[in-house]
Amino acid sequence: MSHPSDDGHSTDSGTTSELSDAERGLRLLALLDSQPPPVVEAEAPPEPEDLEPEPEPDEIPAQRAPAAPPENRPKRKKRRGTVQGALAASDAFIVEQVVSDRLEGRFCWSPHLGWMQWNGKVWVAADDTTVREDVRLYLAEWVVGQLAQPTAGVGSEDLVRLLGKGRIAGLTDLSRGLLLVNGGEFDTDPDIITVENGVLDLRTSALMPHDPKRYLTRYIPTRFVRGARHPDHDMVLSALSPEVHPWLQIRLGQGITGHVPDDDVMLLLHGDGQNGKSSLVDATSLALGGHTDTGAMTFLDDSVLTGDRDAKEERMALKGARLAFAEELPEGRRLNVTQLKKAVGTLLMKARHLYQREVQWVTSHTLVITTNYKPSVSETDHGTWRRLALVPFPYTFVGGEPESDYERKGDSGLKRRLQGREQREAMLAWLAEGARLWYEADRTMPKHPADVVEATRKWRSESDIVMRYWGERLVADYDSHVMSKELMEDLNQFLGEIGQQSWSQKTAADRFGSHEETKSSKVSKELIRSRAGLSRPSASDLGSGWVAARPEPPARYHAWMGVRFATEADMPS
């Protein structure tokens, strides 16, 4: 229908020039809604293990795969509402179409993590630039198509205006709300982990397809092949004694779950040089992606456990971590027990990045230390030592032929070969089987083998001052007792001899009385009248330093019952 204009000419009521902003906006939205989204070449998501995978190069795969939307990604329901005036073509409405056609299933946004991008296997960190470029490409491809086939009612100016820098940035910012995912939704399932060829259920060793709806970020860049074996992996495990091998398999396997150890124990892998310890750690790291920021193995700064200050920044590395290693403590380093108790055996952890707020999370890591030197532990309480287990590596790998039962023939090329695909698959299969056995045992750790118990006891006898004092200066004896004052004096004398600070009477009494050795020997403190069986340090006692005769005891005194001072006759010849 036409009608005359003021100058006598007729105009078409359907031309762009006489359309209102609302009408032009609605036509633009209608075009966006009616046109198929630009085609994005995408790689189909990997299938589960029952399909035969293609051969892969014998090297560590890259951590990030090219971004690609999964074909089965969830589609957002397109929402439409009535619009008035200039709001018809506003970003608030266009962004829904951009999200639905391009961004959904490929990107999400979290206030705590920022932009995250689905790479076909896991969600990885992205930035505004990446998302803006994706929005720009989508709009540019669509606008080019529309300019090639003009549509009545929508002029080229309306189309080109969509490609402005501010418009693209605005659409990107607005899309955050439509793609919002709470940071707490990521990595919430402790029983699964993403591997190269699927999502591994650690409870059953079943393999499932990669799935963006699981919101997983931890990624093991190794294929899972159940029961995989390799001679190089067998050689790595030969560094362990037959009793320790199956026990350590379960402990390290449990470490790749998102659960904390049920016994709150931290392992210290100990042995002199050339003992195979480093090869075990290297093989584990290569299999689990320890060389990446998002693998199932994390390396820590030793200040998390040995520093004198509160290592809040360093503890942030434990947020969301699975198996965490602190490597090669320096000689003479002392474990900070306060730090230890913040990192081991706690349900919730707190830490912060530098100049940022403190955050709290549910603990998910298993902590392991490797060291050639036994760290010093000055604390004597059960709460400290129950958290520690020293794992001995008893063998030495030599270049020539072994000459004793504690020597093994070394292989200088082993470390390089552990990077191979089959070697990594063997280690992952070994760890996954350890995890499965832990679940099968109702998520209960096996008892420590005798080698570990003895190694830990010996370490404690060297490091635990009260235990060492018991071993060198006291003997449990039901018929004897010692005066409390004289035992405290002798204990402080002993501390001076071994280069330690003296303790107050209260500290000495508390640490001695609460010690496991004191309790297991049924030694107790009582107020008694002077009686037979009193043992006193004298010049003949080992290392006592006293040469004068002791004064007569008072009529009443506090005594430790069931113990006496050791004499030369008590010492091994």
Image (spheres, rainbow, N blue to C red):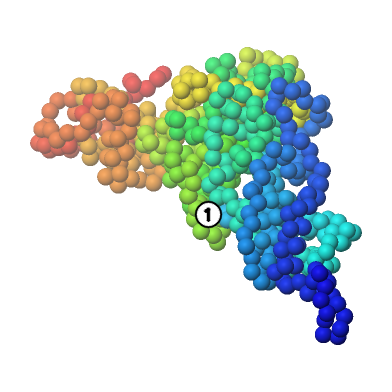
Residue type beneath disc 1: Arg
Circle 1: element type: loop
Res. 211 visible in picture = yes
Q: Residue at x 11, y 37 (%)?
A: 556
Q: Quadrant of residue 503?
A: top left
From what the image shows, is residue 362 above or below residue 48?
below
Residue sitting farthest toward the right: 148
Q: Residues within 10 Å of mark 1 (few under 14, many from 20)?
A: some
Residue sitting farthest toward the bottom: 7
Q: Which quadrant of the figure contains the N terminus?
A: bottom right
- Indicate the position of residue 40 as horizontal and vertical percent values: 80, 46
Q: Which quadrant of the figure contains the C terminus?
A: top left
Q: Of 178 and 404, which appears nearest the observer?
A: 178
Q: Residue at x 61, y 23 (%)?
A: 205
Q: Of 174 and 462, which appears nearest the observer?
A: 174
- Indicate the position of residue 140 as horizontal and vertical percent values: 82, 59
List the residue tagged with mark 1: 352
From what the image shows, is residue 308 above or below residue 226?
below
- Indicate the position of residue 46 as horizontal and vertical percent values: 73, 32
Q: Residue at x 56, y 19 (%)?
A: 246
Res. 427 visible in picture = no
From what the image shows, is residue 279 above or below residue 234?
below
- Indicate the position of residue 130 as horizontal and vertical percent values: 74, 55
230 on left or right of 250: right
